[in-house]
Amino acid sequence: ARHGGVSATMRQWVVARRPAGRVSEADFRLEEAPRPEPGPGEVLLRTQYLGVAPVMLRYLSNETSFERPLAIGDVMHGRGVGIVVASRHPDYAEGDAVQCKLGWREYGLIDGADPYFMPFRMGHPDLRLSYGISSLALSGFTALIGLRDIARLGAADRLLVSGAAGGVGSQVAFMARALGCETVVGIAGGPAKCALLTDRLGYDAAIDYKQDDLPARLDALFPEGIDVFFDNVGGELLDEVLGRIRRRARVAICGRISEYLKTPEEYHRPRNLYRIGLMDAKLEGFFVYDWEPQFRELEDTIAGWIRNGALKPLEDIDEGIERMPAALISLYEGSNAGVRMVRIDPAADGGT
């Protein structure tokens, strides 16, 4: 059936079962469903891109306080970029590009008055829609908040970044430079990713946690200690860094992907936590949605850096909605570099 020149059905991924420890393709099922029509106050978006994030394992197990519980058969949660194709809400017009909680489906229906969907109309239509998953979205906002607002990065600070080739980490060095920081070192796994850090992503030096003697490399690259640590990994790596922090160091806790697949009994027990007090240092976690009132300012700042070449987003784009589970699984295998996403509409950004 056709409706308004667009198919009246759509494809969507639903939860088929709970994950058994780690995410598997069998945890999801691709279904065909009727394309929804907006009621009063609602907006229908055609999905352009969907992002994947490590936290999605916790969505599947209903282990978050900020996401609605998922029942078996529910559409998988996920944030994406959509183009408004029909609107019955005064704040949204046909053709607007909106990033929001769309779910893993080709068309998303959101209630413009319901804060759950966290819609954010993209304000820079000259830039790529895919940036609504990467730099002009939660990944980019997280990088800037962690550096500027949590760590209060200064020009003289010696900065270390873990998970430096990942979705957030791939943007941190660019932003650190834009904020005036002169010494930026990244940690990643494998020679290809480490080369990417120094050749493409703005890092001065790279540490290969898989092959290098990590403590020796940290000592060599930070002989006077570390001022700021932007941590995406947690676990033993965080502990090693805490052993090397300088006085009044700041540690921004963004993630801990090294432990997402472990049970609490397997978590690393830190030895060096006492150094936070000893060195008058600060260790702080943060939740990007707490900064929602600042999203427009964050978007404008980052868009300016993209335009002047200070930030060169690295995006890892897969093609087609059928690739969603594989794209998510790749995050836990560490095979991605940059912000991982899937192009759902083959015409998005001209297909390039």
Image: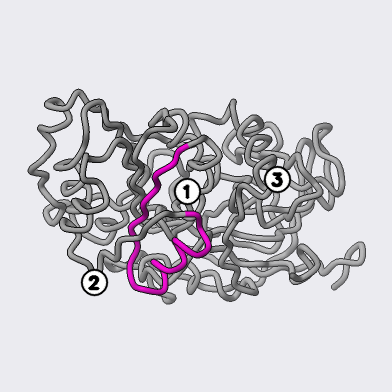
- 201 w.r.t. 118: above or below: below
Identify the residue under disc 2.
211
Q: What crowding class fits label 3: few (fewer than 14 Cα within 10 Å), some (14-19), or many (20 or more)?
A: few
Q: CA distance from mark 1 to mark 3?
A: 16 Å
Which residue is found at the position 16% from the left and 58% from the top? 216
Question: Can residue 259 be found in the magenta stretch?
Answer: no
Identify the residue under disc 1.
173
Please give the label number shown on residue 80. none
Marks 2,1: beta carbons within 8 A: no
Please give the label number shown on residue 308. 3
Q: Which residues are magenta?
A: 181-202
Tag 1: residue type?
Ala
User: Which of 27 and 328 lies nearest the eye of the viewer?
Assistant: 328
Which residue is found at the position 21% from the left and 28% from the top? 247
Q: Where residue 57 appears, x then y in whole percent?
A: 38, 58
User: Which quarter of the rendering shows the C terminus?
Assistant: bottom right
Image quarter for residue 152? top left
- Specify the farthest residue to the right: 4
- Between disc 1 and disc 3, whose residue precedes? 1
Residue 311: in sight, yes or no? Answer: yes
